[in-house]
Image (cartoon, rainbow, N blue to C red):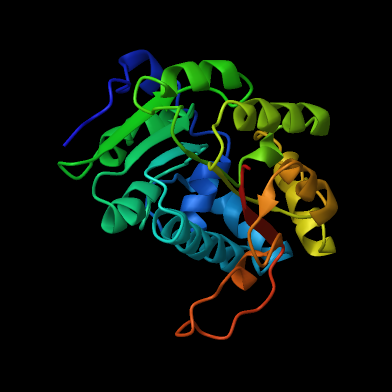
């Protein structure tokens, strides 16, 4: 088992603010997790009152992660994963899904939330053959992320870059596209881009998000599917393309799927 070197220090742990709701903790609450505070549960319930489908969206996004990682590690044969904005661990995290298929898979998680740092030890588990590491870094600084990740990942070989529900926290659209481009350009041919974000396709979701942003929490920008599609520029989209997450290759045994306002896709770098 290989653990990372970026374990949480006392200074980081002291930065946890339990007076303001936090998206990672609210998402954890919607998914049935227990790593959240009263302020997060109150904000999550208020959000759900306006947009009742949000908990379904949260669970659909995790099911999407499981299917996409299964495809990339299985059919595509990728053995390295850079998961940025991983959030709090719940069930079937990236390393668990990838290493079930390929025990030798190497996973580097990136986040900068103090509570996530506190749970880094839970994330830093691996098969004996593989690697799981954790980096404390901000998506606004992709060069730092790439430099730190290169200590565990071999960027001369294909890597799966995962940005799952995180780009909405980059408020400026041009900056978000530039960050994605910087990360993608560092990857060799044969790498994969795996992504999802919530969209502005439902008025109740837009209203709920505005209420959440007004709490003083870090805002999240809902974008159109067309805007999300630009993150894939220059890549080869894998069928069925950029779609509502439950519609991305659902399993035959899955319950009937319904479209939700969270879109994603998987693409290969030529």
Q: How many marks?
A: 0
Instruction: Report whether 170 appears left or right of 104.
Output: right
**Which is nearer the eye, 118 or 185?**
185
- Among the 4 quarters of the image, the one containing residue 60: bottom right
| Residue for point 71% across, 32% down | 170
| Residue for point 61% across, 64% down | 57
| Residue for point 43% across, 33% down | 157
* Quarter of the N terminus within the rendering: top left
- Among the 4 quarters of the image, the one containing residue 88: top left
**Which is nearer the eye, 31 or 258?**
258
Q: Position of residue 213 (x, y in %)?
A: 73, 40
* Quarter of the C terminus within the rendering: top right
* Residue 14 visible in image: no
Quick check: 90 above or below 15?
Answer: below
Q: Position of residue 44 (x, y in %)?
A: 59, 54
Q: Position of residue 226 (x, y in %)?
A: 84, 52
**Which is nearer the eye, 3 or 22?**
3
Q: Position of residue 262 (x, y in %)?
A: 68, 59
Instruction: Report whether 130 appears left or right of 253.
Output: left
Quick check: 212 above or below 31?
Answer: above
Quick check: 180 above or below 144?
Answer: below
- Among the 4 quarters of the image, the one containing residue 215: top right
* Residue 159 visible in image: yes
Quick check: 161 above or below 206?
Answer: above
| Residue for point 49% across, 60% down | 62
């Amino acid at each position: 088992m290989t653990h990372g070197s970026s374990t949480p220090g006392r200074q980081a742990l002291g930065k946890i603010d339990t007076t303001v709701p936090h998206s990672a903790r609210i998402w954890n609450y919607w998914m049935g997790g227990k790593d959240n505070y009263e302020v997060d549960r109150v904000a999550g319930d208020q959000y759900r009152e306006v947009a009742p489908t949000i908990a379904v969206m949260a669970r659909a996004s995790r099911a999407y992660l499981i299917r996409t990682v299964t495809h990339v590690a299985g059919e595509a044969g990728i053995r390295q994963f850079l998961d940025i904005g991983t959030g709090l661990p719940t069930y079937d995290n990236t390393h668990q899904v990838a290493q079930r298929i390929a025990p030798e898979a190497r996973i580097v998680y990136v986040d900068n939330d103090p509570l996530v740092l506190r749970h880094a030890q839970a994330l830093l588990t691996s098969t004996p053959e593989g690697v799981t590491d954790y980096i404390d870094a901000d998506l606004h600084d992709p060069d730092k992320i790439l430099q730190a990740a290169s200590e565990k990942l071999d960027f001369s070989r294909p890597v799966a870059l995962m940005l799952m529900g995180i780009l909405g926290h980059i408020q400026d659209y041009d900056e978000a596209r530039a960050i994605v481009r910087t990360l993608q350009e560092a990857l060799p041919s044969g790498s994969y881009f795996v992504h999802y974000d919530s969209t502005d396709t439902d008025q109740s979701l837009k209203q709920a998000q505005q209420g959440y942003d007004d709490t003083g929490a870090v805002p999240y920008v809902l974008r159109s599917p067309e805007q999300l599609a630009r993150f894939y520029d220059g890549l080869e989209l894998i069928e069925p393309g950029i779609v509502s997450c439950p519609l991305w290759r659902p399993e035959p045994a899955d319950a009937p799927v319904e479209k939700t306002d969270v879109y994603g896709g998987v693409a290969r770098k030529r």
